[in-house]
Image: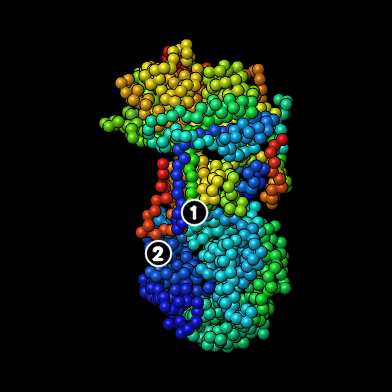
Amino acid sequence: MRIPCPFCGNRDTQEFVYRGDASPTRPDTDEAMHDYVYLRDNVAGPMREHWYHAQGCRNWIVVTRDTRTHEIISAEFPR
Amino acid sequence: MAEPFTITEHTNLALATIMARKGVDPAAIEAALADTQLIPTGPGTWLAVSYCDPPPYPGEGRGPVPTPDLDPGLRRDTLKDLASVSDQSGGYIVYRFSGPAARTLLQRGAFIDLHPSVFGPGSSAVTVIAHIGVILWQADDDTSFDVALFRSFAGSFRHWVEASANAHDRHPDESRDPWDPQV
Amino acid sequence: MSRLPTGGLIDRTKPLAFSFDGKRYTGFAGDTLASALLANDIRLVARSFKYHRPRGILTAGSEEPNALVTIGRGAHAEPNTRATTLPLFDGLEASSQNRWPSLDHDLLSINGILSPLFVAGFYYKTFMWPAALWEKLYEPLIRRAAGLGALSMEPDPAEYDADHGFCDLLVVGAGPAGLAAALAAGRAGQRVLLVDEDVRPGGRLLAERHEIDGNSALDWVDATIAELASLPNVRILSRTILFGAYDGGTYGAVENGRRLWKIVARRAILATGAIERPLVFAGNDIPGVMTASAVQAYATRWGVAPGKRIAIFTTSDSGLKVAADLAAIGIEPVTVIDARDGMLVTRAIGGKALKAIELSDGRRIAVDTLAMAGGWNPSVGLGCNLGARPNWSEAIGAYLLDSPPGGMIMAGAAAGAFGLGAAIASGIEAAGGGMPVPATSEDPSGSRPLWHVPHSRGKAFVDYQHDVTDKDVALAAREGFTSVEHMKRYTTLGMATDQGKTGQVNGNALLAIATGKTMSEAGTILSRPPYLPVSIGVLAGHHRGEHFKPVRHTSGHAWALENGATFVDTGQWKRAQWFARPGERDWLETVSREVTATRTGVGICDVSTLGKIDVHGPDASTLLDRLYVNIFSTLPVGRARYGLMLREDGFVMDDGTTTRFAEDRFYVTTTTVNAARIMQHIDFARQVLWPELDVQATSVTEQWATYAIAGPRSRALLAKLLPDLDLSNEALPYMGAMEFHWQGVTARIFRLSFSGEMAFELAVPAHHGDRLIRALFEAGRVLGVAPYGTEALGVMRIEKGHPAGNELNGQTTATDLGMGRMLSRKKDFIGRVMAARPALVNPARPTLVGIHPVDPARRLRAGGHLLAKGAAPVAANDQGHVTSVCYSPTLGHWIGLALLANGPARHGERIIVHDPIRDGDTEVEVVNPVFVDPEGVRVRG
């Protein structure tokens, strides 16, 4: 699989480290922390994911990828 | 290999990682370091490469140091408030690959397109060869490339060079050692 | 000899000597092993997998299910090599497989007599009782009685390598469609990679007689190849198997069995041709029964008459073309049986060789070769690797991939364009046109599938390689395995090394008939990579043995090697484990000496492998406050502080010391094995969690060679090395740090101690590391300095009760490790909320304690579980486990660290370490984990 790093261009997955769902945001309240740490949707379809370009520019990117077809729809730096 | 290539280790480089501070225009950093080669390694990040004359260190192994290192404090002062600077003169070992077969050899290791139509003078990339992270860039001329990697990987990297260089031309009567260091 | 006097794409001026099962024969350059065997009248080449039936060569291509041989000897032996695609070379030694004592007289053919027992799925129903005998007797017997080739069991001596290819267009297959496509795209200036598995391009044009533009098709092939070779933007890889299609336009290929190619193509044309179907009737596996295209290829390409009396049994126009091509070179078929006229072959007769065929009208005809033309299956497998499914086309009687994945397009016979003109046109169109379609000779391609010959008595094979018959497919259907996926696994049809290339479609059709479905309803299985077998060695390349993964050496490595170090792997690093001296009995003696030398004098350890990260910028201290459990924004310049980092779920992730060199410059250290993980974590925090902070971070692990100098004489040693540096307690207090110059080089000194002794860490840029370690040992010589390795380092930290990797195991909290008080209450940090969960602060959790054996002579081992005295060794009574142990020369007995339920409240208690696997049970006393100098006096010297 190839990931279009916004800085480096298309690169093979071996250069990246996968983290997981990019949708959850670190909450301001203590009460919401448990869900932030443990609960995830199991998405069948386009999903935003965090990948780290460990063997490239060493930036975290948000990749939108269809988990059914592996088609990569977009890849951008987190804002 | 059928066509020649050589590898030499750069021994007179001062290196640093430069990372732009928030809101700083990269052009300001490039202007401040106009006499330094800046290899882009990420957004707002560069490997700064300076050639010291005379060489501060004669190469791997032992020996006295004739002159001081390029003082990282100097660079830090130059870039005050513009960027963070980390000396990497010891961290990376940098090899120069030269010759008509240099590009071919590097292509065997790197899973990025090194065809001259897309990778030419001024091009650079941070990628991986044989599970070793590398920063590679083309020198000014058409047949030379510089490859920087973390120093601890030097032995494993040389093993990849030998294995790949010998790959296409295995003749029992030719034991060519592609590792031909020149000072 | 069956070699024809003239003809064939072989070089009769270059004879080659080879052997098969020990007997010597001759062939020619251009032969395959199969064509050379046939030329030498060898028709029996194998015994089948299960029934040990005599088998001959069925095909002329890589779809061959029968003619598998082992080539080479000893470590060079390669089993399961297809004789049909192996280029003959001088000195080739080949032997048949799966037979004993010989191919001709195989005693295991007894399996044939027992065959009613060995139907599909037999091992689910037989040999089940008694259960104990399955593993010891039945399974080994079954394995020995069935099989293909055998491995040499010696290390693979071959050398493998790799390369990478990038192109605008990847063309898979250099038959007429592929060549035309490559040429059209090449002329249009695209970067083209043409990959073909044969030794030379041309595909079926090498084996069939056609005309292109009025000349022999071979002329067109030669001219096309010559033009392609002249184009700098086109590269041809022959003898290259494109084995898989992967996401993102990535493809894998193996060139010449030795070179792994990873290819990225913007677009790919799969001009992969089609494979001829055998027909299913009794005796269709007798040596001499072949596919019609194979008969044609051996005659045309290799100048070999496969037999003297050849009959053709066809359902297709291509079978008639074979008859015509044979006649053109003087081989008149004895008879042509066209199923479309209603005539069928109901049985082939013979044992080790075909003798005769029986027809549906009752006639028996003596023949030695039967050419089956059962129709064509487009090779769509590669296009299905990403999950696209082929659909049945009633019009052409085959599966077609009408919706290949984006970026892939089928061409030629692979797209159902069987006729030569149509194939070439299809290739040109797939490449974007721009080239006229040449005139070609007539090549009719009509056919009508015949899935099964009725009233055929005897074994009719569907999957030759796995000995699956038509009755096995019917049995699967009767037993409820009615989907093609279940039929495959239950009968093993399609699961051999040929992956069903000649059998899958026939099997699907028989299943459809048995279950009353149409071919469309029955569907087919999806092909998965690799298309043909790929050796593990080629996937490894040069990453084998000690080069399996990169090895990292510190700059002190050469010095350590010279001084007798024994090394240990820590992640990718080689670290000196100990430095044995002559006369020392074992490592324990060596390590104990190193510990004692350090605690009583001075020792030096290379600690360069620890992770080091520069965290710089105006908001660096803010970021560190959010990552560490304790506060770093208050750290003065020139000071270091020990810190603990948690994961967001509240468990300890890593520890290390962080030093502040300036208001906006911090130097963070990590454990060796977590260096990369922490770098990622810091980058995640500053790029994703808090991008509003102005902070930069980069790894400097490799920049600094770092040595620990520890012991009561450490300051004296450094005073000798650095006479101009003020090392007094005032100038450099415990946990202080400063930068200075050493012989013109930037250096740093830290007063840190992992050993619990007065200690320093000295760091210089790594390219001066070798110089420094030598200078340190020179300076320390009169002081009796001794190098120490990771084992002695480990002993000393256990003596001091410092948690390390064994305790930081991802399941422990700060409180578990006795560091609960470090958790700041004044700020938020990663893991703060979850670490406060009641279950994670429950004192009943296993918590850090020290232990030592009640009997001082007893040895301790890590891993044993802790029980109260008298408690039964069951899980419910488990109170924790021993995490680290060592022999303490300082105390004169073994000690350990352990995680014990309610540990700190139980000092003085005696408990049991339960270790049924090794030493048995040991009684220990629970103590303070800081065994040596609990007040911490020595570090502050």
Quarter residue C278 falls in: bottom right
Quarter residue C603 falls in: top left
Q: Amino acid at mark 1?
A: Ala
Q: Viewer-nearest of labels 2 and 1?
A: 1
Q: Residue at x 58, y 37 (%)?
A: B38
Q: Is residue B175 above or below residue C57?
A: above
Chain of the residue where label 2 is placed in the rendered structure? C
- Label 1: element kind: loop
Local packing at callout 2 (Cα closer than 10 Å; few below 14, some 14-19, many 20+) is some
Distance Cα–Cα, label 2 vs label 1: 34 Å
- Give the residue number, with chain letter if any, for mark 2: C72
Residue B112, percent from left and from top: 58, 49
Residue reaching furthest left? C583
Q: Residue at x 57, y 24 (%)?
A: C666
Residue B91, percent from left and from top: 49, 34
Q: Is residue C647 above or below residue C399?
A: above
Chain of the residue where label 1 is placed in the rendered structure? B
Residue C41, percent from left and from top: 44, 79
Quadrant in which the N terminus of chain C is drawn: bottom left
Number of marks in the image? Answer: 2
Q: Amino acid at mark 2?
A: Gly
Q: Residue at x 54, y 36 (%)?
A: B49
Residue C694, percent from left and from top: 66, 27
Local packing at callout 1 (Cα closer than 10 Å; few below 14, some 14-19, many 20+) is some
